[in-house]
Amino acid sequence: MTKNNFKLLYIPLAVVIADQASKMWIKGFSIPFLKIFHTGMLEGERIPVIGDFFRITYIENPGMAFGFDPGLDMKMWVSMFSLIASIGLLIYFYYIRNKSFVLRLSIACIIGGAVGNMIDRMFYGVFYQYGPLFYGRVVDFLDFDFFKFSFFGRTFDRWPIFNIADSAVTIGVLILLFFYRAEKPEDKKDEAPATESEPGQ
């Protein structure tokens, strides 16, 4: 892996640090031996930032996207899937190390988001002493008022509350959809043997 390709790994690292720092600031944390104690917000508490359009609203998502709860029996499998998907994305990132910058950038963003939420699902139950390993809940807090819509039979007056990790995944997917072009036609063009020049040319 070249030095430039390696630098892209700072993107998921930065996403994970920003994501976890913001979640711990919202939820609260304590480091007794350093005498650091941060109370955080109460679950369900709202702080207006730009009126009702943008608020900081602390909730915990027990399951998947859009607040879908798969149930306690499936909770461990959702967490396991997050772990396997994160590992798979890292392997894929190595596999595409020589591919286009846009493809690697999109996957790097998705890796950061996947790992950020995986940490919540795997460890928050243990860290915050409310559940065993793999039974944590994802902390969400970014609350925007966009437009009313329905999804899986549920009607939303506001956009579902999300976090920095969710944003990174969304950005990665949008980059992949709108900016990445398949390289195969270009590769074939580059690899095509040059035609021999006719005598006299």
Image: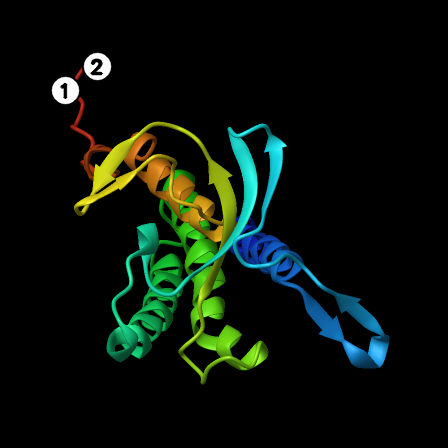
Q: Name the residue under label 1.
A: 198
Label 1: element kind: loop
Q: Residue at x 51, y 44 (%)?
A: 142
Q: Nearer the viewer, residue 152 or 176?
A: 152
Label 2: element kind: loop
Coloured how? rainbow
Figure check: 141 above or below 31: above
Q: In this view, does 196 lie to the left or right of 113?
A: left
Residue 90 numbered tag: none
Q: Nearer the viewer, residue 160 or 116?
A: 160
Q: Which residue is drawn at 60% across and 59% down?
A: 42
Q: Where is residue 40 in the image (x, y as percent from the top left)?
A: 67, 59
The residue type indicated by label 2 comes to Gln
Q: Pick out the residue farthest to the bottom.
A: 132
Circles 1 and 2, Cβ within 8 Å, touching? The answer is yes
Figure check: 37 above or below 100: below
Q: Residue at x 35, y 68 (%)?
A: 82
Q: Is residue 198 left or right of residue 24?
A: left
Q: Where is residue 175 in the image (x, y as percent from the top left)?
A: 37, 36
Q: Which residue is drawn at 29% across and 63% down?
A: 69
Residue 201 numbered tag: 2
Figure quadrant of the C terminus: top left
The residue type indicated by label 1 comes to Glu
Q: Pick out the residue farthest to the top.
A: 200
Figure check: 90 above or below 173: below
Query: 10 Å neighbourhood of mark 2: few (<14), some, or many (≥20)?
Result: few
Q: In this view, does 164 lie to the left or right of 78?
A: right
